Amino acid sequence: MTGQMIDIEAKEGGKFTSYLAKSTSGNGPGIVMIQEIFGVTDWMKQTADRFAENGYTVIAPDMFWRFAPNFVAKPGDEEDFQKAFSYLQQVNYDTAVDDIEVCADHLKGMSECNGKIGVTGFCLGGTFTYLTAARLDIDGAVAYYGTQIHEYLDEGKQVTCPTILHMGEHDETFTVEDRGKIHAALIGKPNVAIYMYDAGHAFANSDRQDVYNAEAAELAHQRSFELFAQLK
């Protein structure tokens, strides 16, 4: 890992840790990268580093800091796996968006950031990415297999920035009916693209060989970089 852990002050007080990976090519867009339920894992840090190598300065915040600070699930550990799912039930989606906003503000204050902000996230972070696009003034959003987007489709009309949803055809975390609702609500919006992949949930996570799909992951990342390149 080439980045570093930093502390960011929350809106209501208190601080949370975040992984910061600075662009390796000078000034460029800032990206807030939102974790899966497993925390800011090594894979998340490696993904942030990859974005930094492509000209972005990335902050990946700890989204569970209010009740399980610095939690990182060990790959394949069943106890940690169960903890992660219990934390999913505790997280507050409104304060999560607040945390993303202060991360965006932090990026805007950095010399490595050109003032443009993109948000991307995986699983739980995919849902947070969608909500951020609906609620905050950002410049681009890419959600990888967001698991609760279908519960917030009434907010879809507020998504006005360029937005991508990456979804797996075989994602078992929500129903085909829920997927249909997402498509019905968002397909046709001129700023939203939905891409389907012959893959399951978490297909981009190379640390989870049981679900990782290299072909789908690389195609999704390529499309993500194409969108975020518009912010340069």
Image (cartoon, rainbow, N blue to C red):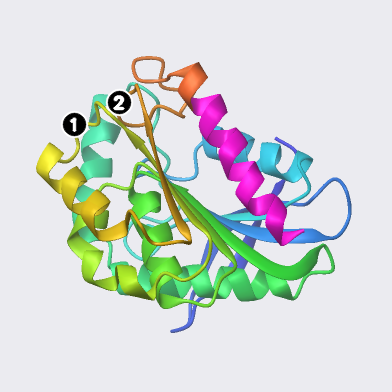
Q: Which of marks 1 and 2 precedes in the sequence?
A: 1
Q: Which mark is residue 65?
A: none
Taken as a whole, is the magenta stretch helix, strand or loop?
helix
Indicate the quadrant where residue 83 lies.
Answer: top left
Q: Is residue 220 magenta?
A: yes
Indicate the quadrant where residue 77 lies.
Answer: top left
Q: Is residue 91 magenta?
A: no
Residue ID at (42%, 20%): 212
Residue ID at (50%, 76%): 10
Label 2 neighbour load within 10 Å: few <14, some 14-19, many 20+: many
Residue 49 image position (x, y, % from top left): 69, 39
Residue ID at (57%, 39%): 223
Query: Cβ–Cβ below 8 Å for labels 2 and 1?
Result: yes
Relative depth, front residue between 94 and 160: 160
Residue 206 vertical position relative to residue 26 in the rendered view, above or below:
above
Q: Which residue is mark 2?
A: 200
Q: Which residue is mark 1?
A: 172
- Which corner quadrant holds the C terminus? bottom right
Residue 89 vertical position relative to residue 113 in the rendered view, above or below:
above
Label 1 neighbour load within 10 Å: few <14, some 14-19, many 20+: few
